[in-house]
Amino acid sequence: MSEDSPYRAVRQEMLELLRQRGIRSGRVLSAMARVPRERFVPESVRHLAYADRALPIGSEQTISQPFIVALMTEALALEGTESVLEVGTGSGYQAAILGELADRVVSIERHQELSARAKRVLDELGYANVTCIVGDGTQGWLDGAPYDRILVAAAAAHVPPALEEQLADRGILVIPVGSPEGQVLQAYRKSGGKLHAEPLSGCRFVPLVGAQD
Ligand code: SAM
């Protein structure tokens, strides 16, 4: 992002807040410094783009708050060589962050209009390693499987079986698990064909809606 961006100061404030809230990964913080979050939010709320809160993006969906994006991304421990599946493209912002930090990203969204808008912004910003798919992410996306990392950006009662199957051994899956009223963000590591959970934080996401939700 250019130094004369009118969003420079608020972006710095966001980064400072993320550090204060415990985000330590320099790679994640740098990615969040590079991606212009204002491009992914509707004009009506653009002045709030860097506030630490979720914002409406249409179709009754939201772009996640920066802290949750940072926490989920940090938990994926991306080094740059990974293939990543994201379920819930929404605005495309999280997909851009993943595109900065991984080798390739497949992002699935059930709302066609959200996917189309996200794809347009991602293309304009040059994220050639991010592929946007319209579909039911609870079934994963077999064409790209297995994935080294999976990030689910909507709340589920349990891990959808297809996602567990499509996660590579020693892979990491981050997903909010719980009821519609509140969830725990869980980071699962797969080893020996089994998932081992590590709770990260309480959270509140819009629901995952699909055949295996
Ligand atoms: N990652 C997004 C971003 O950066 O803006 C925010 C995602 S929003 C909190 C959750 C998204 O998950 C919504 O856009 C919703 O339509 C989508 N969603 C819910 N169930 C889904 C499913 N089964 N497959 C794909 N997308 C789904």
Image: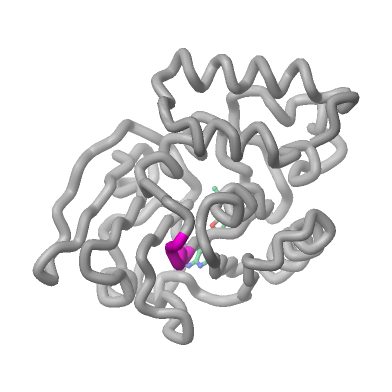
Residue, x 43% and y 56% (percent of image)? 152
Quadrant where ligand 1 appears: bottom right
Nearest to the observer: residue 179 or residue 205: 205
Farthest left residue? 192
Query: Residue drawn at (84%, 26%), measured in percent from left and top?
Result: 3
Vertical placement of residue 180 versus 116, above or below: above
Question: Looking at the image, is 156 positioned above or below residue 47?
Answer: below
Vertical position of residue 166 compared to residue 105: above or below: below
123 on left or right of 193:
right
Q: Residue at 90%, 24% (x, y): give it.
A: 4
Colour theme: one colour
Q: Is residue 82 on the magenta stretch?
A: yes
> Which image quadrant: the C terminus?
bottom left
Left or right: residue 183 versus residue 74 is left
Residue 39 image point, x, y percent: 80, 43
Prevailing secondary structure class for the magenta stretch in the rendered image: strand
Residue 97 screen position, x and y as percent: 59, 47
Q: Which residues are magenta?
A: 81-85
Residue shown at the point (59%, 22%) measured from the top left:
15
Front residue of this view, candidates 1 and 53: 1
